[in-house]
Structures are given as C-alpha cells and as structure tokens.
Amino acid sequence: MPEPKAMRTAFSITPARAKQTVLTPYRESAESPDGLEPYRQESFSKLGLSIETFVQRAKTAADKRLIQLKPELIKGTDGKVAYAVYRGESSLFATLLVAPSLPKIFEELFGKEIWAALPDRHALYLFPAGSPALQEFTADLAERYATDAFAASCEIFSIKAGEDPKVVASFAGLE
C-alpha cells in the first residue's frame, strides 16, 4: 500500500527516488475504518514470510485485482485519450501501482512508459510519460492528497514493463 512516509512501519520499503512515499504491507481487516490495516510484526512473523516474498505475493494479488477492473478513459479536447483512471470505494485501488501487467495494458495507448499518480487509496491515475494533461491536473491531485484522510502519495511514479515503479516528480511541491 503506498502511503506517506510518516506512516512508515518496520516493514515499509521506499520506492526508488521516493522522498515522501513508502510501500507498506497491509491486509484486509473488518476492524479498521477503511477495511485495511498494516501488518504488525507478530502477524508478519507468524506467516513466516520475508518482505521480498510478501512483495512478490502483493504483485500477484495486484495483478489479479487489475484484470477484474476496467479503467475509465478520459479524452482530451482533441478527442484522444488523455489519461486513464481506476477508482472506486475500495481502498485497494492504490495497490494497483505494483501490478506487473499494468504497463503492458497501457503500452499501446500511452507508450512503453506510463506515469502514475495516486493521491488517495481510492484512485490510480495513469498518463503518458511527460503528458501535458498531468501538468494541468496537478492542482487537483494535490488537493485530493491534502484533504483525504487516507492519502496515498504526493509523488508521480514512472512505470515500465519489468521494472519496479520509481518516482519521477511530485505534484504537491514537497521536498
């Protein structure tokens, strides 16, 4: 689960070039207000998993969720698709960032590199790398990040097939 680095746990990992974001192992929980909770050390130990094994399982789970969803394609004034968004009530939408098949799905539409923004846990916005549409949308993304109780990340990630997501920019002006 992408989240602000202030929420870091013992099992959080920092994506490449990230200054404000960590990825933290979460699990579904009926007791939590948003239906998710971070793994505690004792729970993680009981599972007998290393963080590396958990990451691989998380990627597989994200891929399984991804194939069940259909993105909303948003067209620009030129009639071409400007960006795509996965969004809904589930707090798991932000976890789609780590789905290995994500760049393959959008390669024909956006090219070999896509940029992803996830201001909160309920949405994942995808743009062609360097897209002017993303620049026009940054104020809205920053507001979503600043006002959501379950903010995910103020950073923009580059996603390419066969590579882990890496940060290329921030839409909130944080250093």
Image: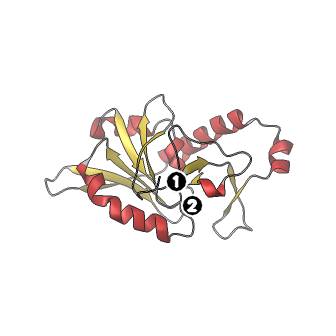
Please identify the residue farthest to the top as the structure is shown: 162
Q: Quick one: 125 or 4, which is closer to the camera?
A: 4
Q: Tell me the crowding category of disc 2: few under 14, some 14 to 19, or many 20 or more residues within 10 angstroms, Cα based.
A: some
Q: Position of residue 149 (x, y in %)?
A: 56, 70
Q: Residue at x 48, y 67 (%)?
A: 146
Q: Tell me the crowding category of disc 1: few under 14, some 14 to 19, or many 20 or more residues within 10 angstroms, Cα based.
A: many
User: Could you say which quadrant of the image residue 77 lies in?
Assistant: bottom left
**Spatial CA span between label 2 and label 1:** 7 Å
Mark identifier at residue 34: none
Q: Quick one: 98 or 18, which is closer to the camera?
A: 18
Residue annotated with mark 1: 94
Kindly state the secondary structure of the residue where label 1 is placed. helix
Q: Position of residue 24 (x, y in %)?
A: 65, 49
State the count of labels. 2
- Badges 2 and 1: C-beta atoms under 8 Å apart? yes
Kindly state the secondary structure of the residue where label 2 is placed. loop
Please identify the residue farthest to the left as the structure is shown: 78
User: What type is the residue that disc 2 sits on?
Assistant: Ser
Q: Position of residue 42 (x, y in %)?
A: 85, 49
User: What type is the residue that disc 1 sits on?
Assistant: Ala
Q: Is residue 74 left or right of residue 39?
A: left
User: Could you say which quadrant of the image residue 168 lies in?
Assistant: top left
Task: Give the vertical position of 127 relative to 119 (above or below).
Answer: above
Q: Is residue 100 left or right of residue 72?
A: right
Q: Position of residue 74 (x, y in %)?
A: 28, 56
Residue annotated with mark 2: 91
Q: Residue at x 33, y 47 (%)?
A: 127
Q: Residue at x 52, y 47 (%)?
A: 19
